[in-house]
Amino acid sequence: MLRYALSRLLSLGLSLLVASVVVFAVIEVIPGDPAAFMLGLNATPEAVAALRDDLGLTGSAGLRYLDWAGGMLRGDFGVSYTYRVPVAELLADRLWVSLPLAVYALALSTAIALPAGMWAAARRGGAADIGVMGATQLGIAVPNFWFAMLLVLLFAVNLRWFPAGGFPGWDGGVMAGLKALTLPAIALALPQAAILARVMRSALIETLGQDYIRSARAKGLTRAQAIRRHGVRNALIPVLTILGLQFSFLLAGAIIIENVFYLPGLGRLIFQAITQRDLIVVESVVMLLVFAVICVTFAVDIAYAAVDPRLRRR
Amino acid sequence: MIEVENLSLTIHSTPVLQGVSFQIAPGQIVGLAGESGSGKSMTALAMMGLLPPGARATGAIRLVDRELLDLTERQLCAIRGRQIGMIFQEPMTALNPMQTIGAQVAETLVIHDAATRSEALEKARARLDRVGLPADRFPLTRYPHELSGGQRQRVCIAMAIALRPRLLIADEPTTALDVTTQARILDLLAGLVREEGMALMLITHDLAVLSGLAERVAVMQGGRIVEQGPTSAILRRPGHPYTRALIAAATHHPAPGTRAPGAALLEVREARRAYRPAGRGAFTRPAPVRAVDGVSFDLRRGECLGLVGESGSGKSTLARAILGLDPLQGGAIRLDGQRVAAGQPMPHDLRRRMQAVFQDPYGSFNPRHRVGRLIAEPFHLAGRPPDADDRVAEALRAVGLDPDDRNRFIHEFSGGQRQRIAIARALITRPDLIVLDEPVSALDVRVRAQILDLLADLRGRFGLSYLFIGHDLQVVRAIADRVMVMHAGRIVEQGAAEQVLHAPRHPYTRELLAAVPELPAPIA
């Protein structure tokens, strides 16, 4: 187990190194001068030169990479060109919206999907199965921003249970913050839950055909006990894979939902940074997301080993 | 004690069992024999109340004085595992890979409220000791993947007998195991019956397994019991033609080849291959396992050379090296003087001259291709000849199938027919040597006899040479001219088939021979 974890940790470190080189190189190989690109056509040569200096574009590429990467390790991501504040502060603010939103959405989607998938698998071919499968079809087919608008209409405009948008910040209390994130989290969670429920169902159905389920029944377990005690854990590996992918997506891919609900999250930040050509912010947000994805992958790898004893020996 | 009376079963209104009746007394071993599809397993599942959906059973199954067919699912759950235990054919997949063996044995006790968790673990320990898995080598915390097939079957037995049931049903418990392991598991079962007064219903396709073990035998065919009675009477004086056919097939020897073997075709010299098993600790490296350890032999043109050994003896590793699928770490393999070496592109002509047939034909065919395309697959080696279609038809005819079968899919064929198709695919390139890796181990006795006849016939007709790999000495003896016995990566004995089998020199060969269950001599 220790050896497995160490080898995963090593590959995490290597992935980060490679990713940082790639992100840095992409900015390097953009044709022309990034500073001139950021300032637009009407910039004066002095302004461009000043920005070049700000961006750290003077000196050799290797030294600049070390400077940039070293800064990030110390938590120094540079200063945003458009906002004129340290990027680290900007990221921290946004992360406090995006991270809770992603966790919230993922928790909701797991809470809906796993029981639904198990229920459908246990009653394969029955009314429950057909119902769940129909609902997941719908969940996958309907775009989440449309769900979002329906949710706003129903729960914010008509029932007035939740705010229609905006984020009050966590200073106003945890409940107010969660309340503001509830509708976006549901809108994000539903399509994810639909996918996850299908994966759970098919993995469990495959597991239920295995010989050890028959052995368990021969011991005197009821069907439900056999599913619970022997089926579910064996079906978890593909579910964990999808969960990992979904979390990474939720962290960065919530741009549309963040826009619908006016949430100051990472998705909106990167969208705005791109339109404003703020390469410093883009570079940092991309690096942060890469870091998050790699960490999630690491967590999923460790979870695999926790679930399946056969993987601990690798 | 358990009485099955006039049991009939339909699945989605297709009849599966018809009027099956037999009884088992406490402490008695009863054998249920028959080929696949004869209804043996369905009879067992009916007794367990574990029939598939759509099944309807009529008749009676009485355990002591309870009618099992009338019980609710809840009542049946209380009987399974407590009154009737069951073990199955495939020990490799019969255990949950995610749970320790201790937890799985203890579960039987916990589920029936027979013990608290800690008591259950204590009893599980005692049961594992009883089935021959001592605590020092097999602590409760072991996982199934750390055990061999025979050891896993022992865990399954411990699970099934944890509550000392009145009846243990064993459905082909040793079919997937080596002869020596089979002999030990059968010994264990017989000992449990003696000590615990438990009854045993032993389901098998191999009548020889029952001789000397079961008191009574019932022979099933097509969902009916065609004959039943005391084992020795049935095996020595079978009354029903089907029983006679089964016994004849089990001891069948194909007609021996008439051609004298020629010069050496395959030469193996000092072949060596070791691999490192997966390690347990973070920093310790386990010692390498010598899978093939200095093996040398010649296979002459037109000869059938048998290679016998248990699983783990290195015979499959050797076969893969000969086929050029895995590299050797030392030594050399030559086919007709040309060197076989994995890891570098093998000349197509060399590959063409050496083909293989494996144990599980279904797994080695792409289910989405038609048979014609499957058989013609090796043509990509040397280019598709202009008469490819004729040659596919010829190969199908050679293995006793219809040339029109080429338009069908592999799932439409029975196990024996699939093995014929695998042989047709091996024949298509007109090879010199066919490596047959356990080609009949998964087949019923009568089909096995037919395939052995076919192999003997093809060898004579096309001048083929075979390397026939198997764990069953009976089968290898039936077809091979010469036999090599492999143990722990080495050839411990080789010689003419009759000599090795009748006057074995190496103790391991003797052990192997002693483990082979034999049918009693018939009384005319």
Image: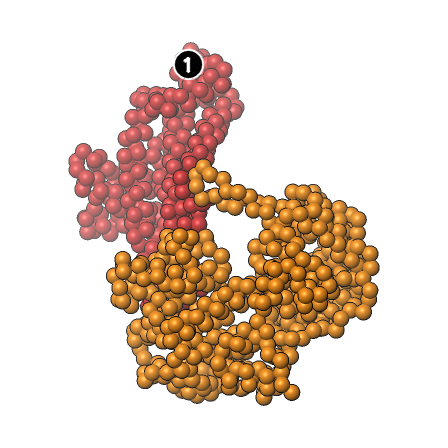
Chain colours: A red, B orange
Residue at the spot x=34%, y=34% of the render?
Answer: A266
Residue type at mark 1: give it. Asp
The answer to which of A87 and A49 lies nearer the viewer is A87
In the rendered image of this protein, does residue B446 appear above or below residue B336?
below
Quarter occupied by residue B396 = bottom right
In the rendered image of this protein, does residue B353 appear above or below residue A21?
below
Q: Which of the image's four quarters has the C terminus of chain B?
A: bottom right
Coordinates of residue B166 in the picture (x, y in percent)? 36, 76
Residue at the spot x=57%, y=67% of the render?
Answer: B515
As drawn, the residue found furthest toward the left would be: A172
Q: Tell me if A256 is positioned left or right of B379 in this view.
A: left
Residue at the spot x=78%, y=69% of the render?
Answer: B257
Coordinates of residue B37 in the picture (x, y in percent)? 54, 76
The answer to which of B50 and A121 lies nearer the viewer is B50
Residue under label 1: A53
Residue at the spot x=35%, y=36% of the render?
Answer: A267
In the rendered image of this protein, does residue A127 appear above or below residue B434?
below
Coordinates of residue B324 in the picture (x, y in percent)? 68, 49
Q: Secondary structure at mark 1?
A: helix
Q: Provide the chain ID for the residue under circle 1.
A: A
Q: From where the camera sits, is residue B357 visible?
A: no
Q: From where the camera sits, is residue B134 visible?
A: yes
In the rendered image of this protein, does residue A214 appear above or below residue B31?
above
Q: How many marks?
A: 1
